[in-house]
């Protein structure tokens, strides 16, 4: 994951609601899986292991976010643990077939969460975050993001 992707995810997280957050976490996971696939093709073992570890960490975050008061969470837990274990096997085997299978499972889950997120009309999770306004300016087809500093007293006070 490069610096621009990290900035993009950070910006999206600062503006998202509960439903969008899970979508962003999945997007981060898919970015790490893509990085692992690219590193495998380039035979870069260190980057490959790093990307897979980060993907496993992201799956652990998804597991930690489950609310076991709902029966669906038990099923998701089983799928997430299976995928995390598959990634561990992929790390040491160095074969992309298990990686593809894991990504397919996660893509199906992602589609369901994406549909559910469309129905979420809750407020953004970060109420005191800086607002981002994006639009086309007079540059040559470049999207420019402006950060409006309306309240200079954002954040936490001790």
Image (tube, rainbow, N blue to C red):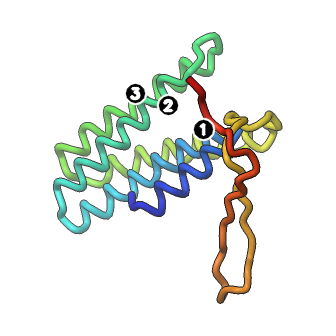
In the image, residue 142 lies at what x, y percent? 64, 80
**Nearest-to-viewer mark from 1 and 3:** 1
Q: Which mark is residue 125?
A: none
Whole-angstrom CA distance, mark 1 to mark 3, is 17 Å
Q: Residue at x 25, y 66 (%)?
A: 41
Whole-angstrom CA distance, mark 1 to mark 2, is 8 Å
- Tell me the element at label 2: helix
Per the image, the residue denoted by label 3 is: 81
In the image, residue 62 lies at what x, y percent? 50, 31
Per the image, the residue denoted by label 1 is: 22
**Tag 1: Cα neighbours inside 10 Å, few (<14), some, or many (≥20)?**
some
Residue farthest along the bottom direction in this orientation: 140
Label whose residue precedes the other's in the sequence (1 or 2): 1
- Tell me the element at label 3: helix
Quadrant containing the C terminus in the rendered view: top right
- Tell me the element at label 1: helix
Per the image, the residue denoted by label 2 is: 62
100 w.r.t. 140: above or below: above
103 w.r.t. 141: above or below: above
| The one of 146 and 5 positioned closer to us in this rendering | 146
In the image, residue 77 lies at what x, y percent? 49, 23
Pointer 1 with pointer 2, Cβ within 8 A? yes
């Amino acid at each position: 994951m490069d610096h621009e992707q990290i900035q993009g995810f950070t910006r999206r997280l600062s503006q998202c609601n509960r439903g969008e957050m899970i979508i962003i976490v999945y997007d981060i996971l898919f970015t790490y899986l893509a990085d692992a696939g690219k590193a495998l093709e380039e035979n870069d073992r260190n980057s490959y292991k790093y990307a897979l570890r980060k993907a496993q960490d992201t799956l652990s975050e998804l597991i930690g976010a489950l609310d076991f008061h709902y029966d669906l969470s038990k099923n998701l837990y089983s799928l997430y643990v299976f995928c995390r274990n598959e990634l561990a096997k992929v790390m040491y085997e160095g074969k992309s077939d298990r990686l593809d299978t894991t990504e397919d499972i996660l893509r199906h889950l992602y589609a369901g969460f994406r549909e559910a997120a469309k129905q979420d009309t809750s407020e953004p999770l970060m109420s005191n975050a800086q607002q981002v306004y994006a639009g086309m300016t007079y540059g040559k087809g470049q999207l420019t993001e402006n950060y409006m500093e309306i309240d200079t007293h954002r954040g936490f006070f001790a």
